[in-house]
Image: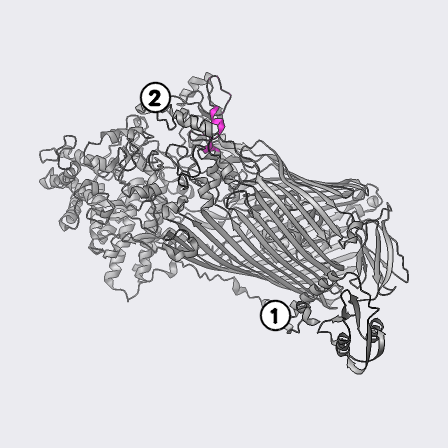
């Protein structure tokens, strides 16, 4: 012991150097395809897991301002929607170093060019996906395409058009380089059709507000058509099965947020009324919107109007807010609902969406074509169970272009409800004042189409501008 | 004979284990002394022998063969091999032995049972008696328990109740050293006298009291810094089981926060406020020179003294680790004299100190029905959960009182045993302690076994050696508790009293929707079916060699280490809420850590005329490393095996970690005294720490202080009133390096929070994402502190006082610098911001009554600290925290650090009571009605009230830290009785009572919900209830737009000021004269009450308790932590 003490006397200052052994830094990583893929994984988790954002409906963020979710009073405070900003930029910060590493050739010659291109395509697709979300919510946003560096403070908001330009570039690259089919054990990853479908949505958004670059309708139609013609996807025939957990990898779900048995992230109590399985009733439909939903099989598949599981004999009128609840995310077993766990996936892109995109775009290019009607009528027929429903009629070429367009947007509202889609439709079609509950209308302003830039970022960067209608600190 | 005493005979051993041998020897000596009863007459024993040139060893063997006598000696005694001649014919054994040993270094001593011990002369001396009486020089009262020791030997006794002593000495030469605490030690030559009476002069000023300071000691009179001392006698007066409790209320400038009341639960110690936001505010704890100890692993009985270093003059010597104050603990060594055994036992019974009021089942059912009878909005028909028959049943049979179900009588037992003693070359203390504490909450328990061996030896004239070894094993068990919904502590006072514990099949009763709060779980199941067991094992060892190189010059080389293993096991079986959801969840973590320290201290001490100078130079190195791993399993095939069968879990995830940090330091200090009047201390320390950025590894910490002993000046020297008066001024800089290592490096995060099932949704894929970015400029947090203090002692020490004022400014706060979120990383650890602490500390103590029979010693201390955030970095005015989890409508930040405000600031909506019946119109303007809560409309977008209560109307609604606190200790001695008590108090702090948010709502169980507002009953805080349909018909527009943080309201913030009789002890010390007859020197019986009386307005379990959610900025939230208990302890201490 004492001799050890004497040894210690010879102190050396190099002991102050730090050599971490239980973590890596971004500069000594991304040297193999698997390491690059780990960045994709992290970028998805940022948006999904751990009660962060999408896993519980972004509650109580921006989705509630649409006409579907309860409580959309259009009182949009300066702190609203900060969560979306954070998670998407986190995901981008994960992806940029991976993109740089591939471009810099860090993967080495042992990895084939095809693999490198596929990885780059996936990285760029994911990044574009995040920017697509950001640009729709906030308008002009900082376009950060390089590695995180704090010393750099020349960050300003790039115009919406520039952001879309980058998104289109990245997504086009993805449509050309992503595999047509991901390996079976990896099919939760996006493939080329997912990129095409998402790009169709990008184009149609560009064709509408705020850019109104209508030439993109044709691009949107072409992209959607490629997916339809590819024939890999189709609608699930029974509307009750759309959210059935057996169908989470097709034929209709193209890309989704997934859960695994190792980590459940959704608590079904969020969606359940207090009368059932100790529900918390956090998220309900807007009463007017829910009651106006046409009576048809789809209504009962997507909305919760009574108790199908626990024999409480209650209906939505007995429940806390006397409004229909959301059933789309209550397709796990009643036993799991009691345990307050759910392994259910939430779709990001469904084939139904691609059909609707095609129909909308084709109509805007050519007027109501038979192809457009056929596409959208697949959805209507499934919704009604094939029984003609005057409240939810089939589309015909006899409709005017304008009526057809309105009807498609309405059909999107019904079919894609509570899938983070309605708010963006309202914004790009500029119909917020038309669809908002009259009670909330006094709160409406044209500024509501954009969310505020977060106060924290404004405070820390003078060069960032704030969107109209909001204050800066 | 030897075979009969196998364990007592030292076996020759290798040099490496010499140390162990010395300890064993010490134990043997102790043991033999204990065995000593009365010597048997050996007069009948005779010896018959005639030998030449035989070793003593052989001669004694022959004697053993001839008689019943057995000799006992160490094999190591070389002198036993000396050869002698013996010629004896039926000679008495005693005279034979006298003859044998006359020419040797050895001697013998006879014992009962024919046992004769042979040992070197200095161990066993022949005896002549010296007697005498020791008295107080002023009062002539006899002094009891005075140490009388023959200098240079182990021979010593204590005076009896009459002040008398009888000491057996080998001859009438040498000196007697007479020492007594509080008196000046005297040395008297025996000089042939058989009766020596001495009167001792009292030393009330305790001028010679030595205070332990960093890397040395100093006479209290020479101290220039602010140091509070707590001595062992003070600790023994009010028995405590934990060291942190022992500090509570006894020292100024120290704030102790109980973060929970569980057995073995945590406390926070803050010295002179909180300096840091992220660097940690825990003081540095040093036990016998070894840094970074865990204070709760210490057995309080082992402590000789504790010094709390507060100002920079005292703490700067610890440089980068001194900013939060330093607690120096010195453990005991034996005193010269016969070996002493201290033994103690206590048993304490505990119960929940305060039960929260709850409704009985019938009342709850009626309230529930009443509440729901108003549910008529949107055309609803009210739904009643309880029928009249149900209510009648509850009225007849009662329901469940959940607090009675989960809280029980707790039992705490302690046992201590210590042996200590000293020879002139060796001092030792060996102790062990056991604490077993079964808590008041079901399934909670803490046990601690501790062992210590201290040794100090003079090896040669110029080398001393010292060793401290301690071992502690602790096991902590408790059901989880905190504000998290579903925990037992949180749920017990809010689970419906109508629900039974078990159903008719003996299974735990499950919650029925509508019958009380939905986000809860059977509290008994949560307590009993969650298994938490956390054992910790720690070894501490340090040793030193002290070389006296020349007169006044010494070099002390110290090396030591702390080696700990910590294990955490938790299993939530399928009867718990988490276990039910995941079919059993188990977590295991194992961690191992080492801290190695080497300290080298060079001291030079010189007195020349009026000058006294001490120079201290230190070179020190600390190196710590740790590693660990953890496992988490869920979905267990066999529920009852739990974490003992992790491979029975369907899904298992693992993690592992490793890290290290190093600190290299050099320090110099000069203490200079002129005429014992003018004192100066200067110190400078350089610290190199591995945890900082490439460019800033080294930090430098200077300090200086001066003191003037005014009482030594001519004009005061002969004062009858002023005995001592000293003025102190100090200034210095200390640092804080309390961040995790590698904080300056960029890092990719991995693990569970980065994983996502890309792999077909079956398993989680491994993810790596950016978690930290690099900051090569990261450096120390530094605190500059100035202090002015006065020490006064009046009337020969009958009245003493110490007053200090200080100001501390901490700059370069180690804090996450916020980054714009578009960076993707929300912050980077950096040095920004500044915090100030100012304070006043007053201690007044004295002996108002001091006669020989009746004595009252009292000490009152007052501590005030004001804390203010000066700066939080560019562009940051405030930082918000949400220390609670969901379920309380506290979705956005409600605790804030804000420039210009102190730590612990709560912000939210200001509750103004309920709208009065005469305020109908005003209420309606806000969409409210009379009887509904009224909140202050303070501001709007234009800075003026705008008719809407929203985010802009949030204001300060409370402060978590007290304005001031007091501690008042008292010791009253009357004859053999001793009464001591400690009163503590803290005033001006608020607590956010989160539990009330849930207990006073529609699902509430608090009986006060019945006291709802009506036009006839307006003097209440419980809102009115209106018919839902009627309210809708009023077409009100709600202007109370709280978003998701309606709970952030001053309605739940309460004044948590309190005055508490913390402990009271009544002890009886048995008469010494009586005790000596049975071989005891001390016997003491005591009864202690803890937390017997608390005066407070706070309505929660305890105003003194608040969970610490990892940040000093968020102190002030009552988060349903394990509640405090009231304890009654009986105990006994013996010394013999």
Is the residue at mark 2 from the same chain as the one at mark 1?
no
Q: Main secondary structure of the magenta part?
A: loop
Residue B1078, position as x, y percentages in the image = 77, 53
Subunit of mark 2?
B
> Which residue was labeled with disc 2?
B1029
Q: Which residues are magenta?
A: B996-1021
Above-or-below relation of A114 to A68: below
In front: B88, or A459?
B88
Q: Give the numbered dot on residue A393.
A: none
Q: Nearer the viewer, mark 2 or mark 1?
A: 2
The quadrant of the rendering that contains the C terminus of chain B is bottom right
Residue B361, position as x, y percentages in the image = 45, 30
In front: A466, or B1083?
B1083
Mark 1 is surrounded, within 10 Å at the Cα level, by few (under 14), some (14 to 19) or many (20 or more) other residues, namely few
Residue B898, position as x, y percentages in the image = 50, 39
> Which residue was labeled with disc 1?
A3
Q: Secondary structure at mark 1?
A: helix
Does B337 lie within the magenta span? no
């Amino acid at each position: 012991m004492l001799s050890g003490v004497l040894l210690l006397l010879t102190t050396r200052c190099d002991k102050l150097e730090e050599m971490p052994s239980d973590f890596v830094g971004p500069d000594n990583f991304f040297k193999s395809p698997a390491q690059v893929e780990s960045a994709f994984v992290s970028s998805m988790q940022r948006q999904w897991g751990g009660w962060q954002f999408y896993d519980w409906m972004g509650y109580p963020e921006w989705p509630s301002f649409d006409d579907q979710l309860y409580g959309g009073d259009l009182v949009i405070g300066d702190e609203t929607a900060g969560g979306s900003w954070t998670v998407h930029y986190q995901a981008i910060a994960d992806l940029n170093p991976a993109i740089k590493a591939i471009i810099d050739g860090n993967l080495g010659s042992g990895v084939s060019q095809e693999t490198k291109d596929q990885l780059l395509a996936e990285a760029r697709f994911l990044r574009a996906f995040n920017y697509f979300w950001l640009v729709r919510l906030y308008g002009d946003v900082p376009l950060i395409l390089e590695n995180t560096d704090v010393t750099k403070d020349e960050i300003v908001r790039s115009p919406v058009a520039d952001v879309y330009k980058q998104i289109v570039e990245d997504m086009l690259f993805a449509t050309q380089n992503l595999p047509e089919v991901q390996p079976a054990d990896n099919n939760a990853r996006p493939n080329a059709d997912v990129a095409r479908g998402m790009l169709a949505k990008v184009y149609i958004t560009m064709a509408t507000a705020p850019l109104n670059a209508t030439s993109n309708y044709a691009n949107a139609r072409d992209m959607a058509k490629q997916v339809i013609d590819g024939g890999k996807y189709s609608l699930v025939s029974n509307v009750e099965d759309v959210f059935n957990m057996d169908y989470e990898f097709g034929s209709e779900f193209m890309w989704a947020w997934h859960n695994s048995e190792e980590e459940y992230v959704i608590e079904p109590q969020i969606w359940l009324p207090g009368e059932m399985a100790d529900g918390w009733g956090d998220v309900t439909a807007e009463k007017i919107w829910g009651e106006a939903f046409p009576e048809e099989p789809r209504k009962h598949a997507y909305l919760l109007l009574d108790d199908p599981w626990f024999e409480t004999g209650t209906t939505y009128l007995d429940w806390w807010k006397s409004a229909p609840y959301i059933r789309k995310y209550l397709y796990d077993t009643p036993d799991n609902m009691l345990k307050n766990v759910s392994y259910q996936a939430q779709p990001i892109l469904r084939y139904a969406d691609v059909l609707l995109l095609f129909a909308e775009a084709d109509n805007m290019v050519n007027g109501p074509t038979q192809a457009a009607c056929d596409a959208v009528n697949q959805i209507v027929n499934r919704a009604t169970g094939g029984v003609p429903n005057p409240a939810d009629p089939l589309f015909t070429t006899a409709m005017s272009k304008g009526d057809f367009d309105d009807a498609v947007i309405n059909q999107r509202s019904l079919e894609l409800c509570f899938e983070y889609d309605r708010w963006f439709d309202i914004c790009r079609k500029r119909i917020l004042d038309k669809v908002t509950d009259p009670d909330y209308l006094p709160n409406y302003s044209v500024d509501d189409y954009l969310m505020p830039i977060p106060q924290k970022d404004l405070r820390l960067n003078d060069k960032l501008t704030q969107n109209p209608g909001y204050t800066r600190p | 004979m030897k075979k009969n005493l196998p364990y007592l005979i030292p076996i020759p051993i290798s040099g490496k284990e010499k140390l162990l041998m010395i300890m064993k020897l010490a134990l043997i000596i102790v043991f033999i002394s204990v065995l000593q009863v009365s010597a048997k007459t050996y007069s009948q024993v005779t010896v018959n022998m005639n030998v030449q040139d035989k070793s003593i060893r052989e001669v004694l063997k022959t004697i053993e063969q001839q008689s019943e006598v057995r000799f006992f000696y160490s094999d190591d005694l070389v002198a036993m091999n000396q050869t002698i001649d013996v010629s004896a014919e039926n000679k008495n054994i005693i005279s034979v032995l006298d003859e044998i040993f006359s020419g040797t270094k050895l001697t013998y001593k006879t014992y009962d049972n024919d046992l004769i011990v042979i040992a070197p002369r200095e161990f066993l001396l022949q005896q002549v008696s010296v007697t005498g009486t020791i008295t107080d020089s002023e009062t002539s009262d006899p002094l009891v328990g005075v140490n009388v020791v023959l200098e240079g030997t182990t021979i010593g006794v204590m005076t009896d109740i009459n002040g008398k002593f009888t000491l057996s000495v080998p001859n009438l030469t040498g000196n007697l050293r007479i020492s007594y605490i509080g008196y000046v030690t005297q040395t008297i030559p025996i000089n042939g006298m058989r009766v020596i009476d001495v009167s001792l002069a009292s030393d009330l000023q305790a001028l010679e009291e030595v205070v332990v300071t960093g890397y040395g000691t100093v006479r209290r009179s020479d101290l220039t810094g602010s140091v509070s001392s707590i001595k062992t006698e003070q600790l023994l007066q009010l028995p405590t089981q934990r060291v942190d409790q022992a500090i509570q209320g006894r020292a100024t400038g120290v704030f102790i926060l109980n973060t929970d009341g569980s057995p073995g639960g945590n406390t926070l110690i803050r010295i002179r406020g909180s300096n840091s936001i992220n660097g940690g505010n825990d003081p540095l704890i040093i036990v016998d020179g070894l840094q970074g100890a865990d204070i709760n692993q210490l057995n309080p009985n082992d402590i000789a003294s504790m010094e709390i270093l507060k100002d920079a003059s005292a703490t700067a010597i610890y440089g980068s680790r001194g900013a939060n104050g330093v607690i120096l603990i010195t453990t005991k060594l034996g005193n010269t004299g016969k070996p002493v055994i201290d033994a103690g036992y206590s048993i304490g019974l505990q119960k929940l100190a305060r039960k929260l009021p709850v409704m009985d089942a019938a009342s709850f059912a009626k309230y529930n029905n009443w509440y729901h009878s108003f549910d008529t909005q949107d055309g609803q028909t009210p739904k009643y959960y309880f029928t009249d028959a149900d209510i009648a049943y509850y009225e007849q049979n009662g329901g469940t009182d959940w607090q009675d179900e989960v809280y029980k009588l707790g039992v705490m037992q302690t046992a201590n045993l210590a042996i200590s003693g000293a020879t002139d070359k060796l001092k030792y203390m060996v102790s062990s302690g056991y604490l077993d504490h079964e808590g008041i909450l079901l399934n909670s328990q803490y046990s601690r076994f501790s062992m210590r061996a201290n040794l100090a030896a003079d090896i040669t004239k110029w080398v001393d050696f010292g060793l401290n070894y301690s071992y502690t094993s602790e096991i902590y068990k408790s059901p989880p508790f905190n504000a998290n919904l579903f925990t037992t502590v949180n749920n017990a006072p809010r689970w419906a009293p109508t629900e039974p514990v078990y159903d008719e099949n003996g299974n735990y009763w499950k919650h029925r929707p509508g019958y009380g709060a939905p986000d809860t779980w059977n509290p008994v199941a949560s307590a009993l079916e969650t298994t938490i067991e956390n054992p910790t094992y720690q070894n501490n060892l340090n040793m030193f060699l002290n070389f006296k190189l020349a007169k006044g010059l010494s070099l002390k080389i110290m090396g030591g280490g702390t080696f700990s293993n910590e294990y955490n096991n938790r299993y939530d079986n399928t009867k718990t809420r988490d276990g039910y959801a995941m079919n059993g969840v188990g977590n295991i973590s194992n961690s191992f850590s080492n801290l190695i320290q080497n300290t080298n201290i060079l001291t030079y001490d010189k007195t020349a005329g009026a000058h006294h100078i001490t120079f201290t130079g230190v070179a020190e190195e600390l190196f710590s490393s740790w590693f660990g791993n953890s496992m988490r399993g869920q979905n267990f095939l066999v529920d009852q095996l739990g974490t003992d069968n992790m491979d029975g879990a369907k899904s298992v995830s693992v993690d592992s970690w490793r890290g290290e940090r190093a600190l290299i330091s050099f320090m110099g200090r000069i203490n200079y005294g002129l005429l014992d009047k003018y004192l100066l201390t200067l110190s400078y320390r350089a610290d190199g720490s591995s945890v900082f950025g490439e460019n800033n590894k080294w930090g430098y910490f200077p300090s200086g202080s001066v003191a003037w002993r005014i009482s030594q000046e001519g004009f005061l020297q002969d004062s009858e009133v002023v005995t001592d008066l000293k003025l102190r001024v100090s200034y210095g800089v200390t640092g804080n390096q309390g961040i995790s290592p590698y904080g300056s490096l960029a890092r990719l995060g991995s693990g569970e929070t980065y994983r996502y099932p890309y792999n077909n949704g079956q398993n989680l894929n491994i993810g790596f994402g950016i978690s930290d970015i690099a900051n090569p400029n990261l450096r120390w947090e530094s605190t500059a502190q100035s202090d002015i203090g006065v020490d006064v002692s009046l009337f020969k020490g009958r009245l003493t006082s110490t007053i200090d004022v200080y100001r501390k400014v901490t700059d370069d706060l180690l804090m996450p610098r916020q980054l714009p979120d578009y960076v993707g990383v929300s912050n980077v650890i950096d040095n920004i911001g500044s915090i100030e602490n100012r304070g006043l500390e007053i201690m007044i103590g004295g002996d108002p009554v001091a006669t020989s029979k009746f004595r009252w010693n009292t000490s009152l201390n007052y501590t005030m600290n004001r804390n203010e955030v000066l700066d939080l970095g560019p562009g940051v005015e405030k930082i918000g925290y949400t220390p609670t989890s969901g379920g309380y409508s506290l979705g956005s930040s409600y605790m804030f650090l804000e420039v210009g405000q102190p730590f612990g600031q709560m912000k939210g909506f200001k509750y103004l009571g309920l709208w009065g019946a005469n305020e109908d119109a005003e209420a309606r303007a806000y969409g409210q009605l009379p009887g509904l809560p009224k909140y202050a409309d303070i501001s709007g977008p234009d800075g003026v009230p705008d008719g809407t209560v929203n985010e802009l109307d949030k204001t300060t609604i409370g402060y978590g830290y007290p304005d001031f606190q007091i501690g008042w200790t008292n010791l009253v001695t009357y004859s053999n009785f001793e009464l001591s008590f400690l009163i503590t108090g803290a005033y001006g702090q608020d607590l956010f009572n989160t539990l009330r948010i849930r207990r006073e709502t529609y699902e509430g169980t608090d009986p006060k919900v019945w006291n709802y507002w009506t036009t006839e009953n307006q003097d209440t805080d419980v809102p009115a209830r209106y018919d839902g349909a009627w309210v809708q018909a009023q077409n009100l527009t709600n202007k109370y737009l709280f978003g998701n943080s309606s709970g952030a309201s001053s309605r739940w913030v309460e004044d948590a000021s309190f005055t508490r009789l913390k402990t009271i002890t009544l002890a009886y010390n048995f008469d010494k004269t009586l005790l000596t007859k049975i071989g005891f020197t001390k016997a003491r019986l005591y009864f202690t009450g803890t937390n017997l009386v608390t005066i407070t307005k706070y309505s929660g379990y305890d105003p003194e308790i608040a969970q610490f959610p990892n940040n000093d900025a968020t102190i002030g939230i009552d988060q349903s932590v394990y509640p405090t208990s009231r304890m009654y302890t009986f105990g006994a201490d013996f010394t013999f």
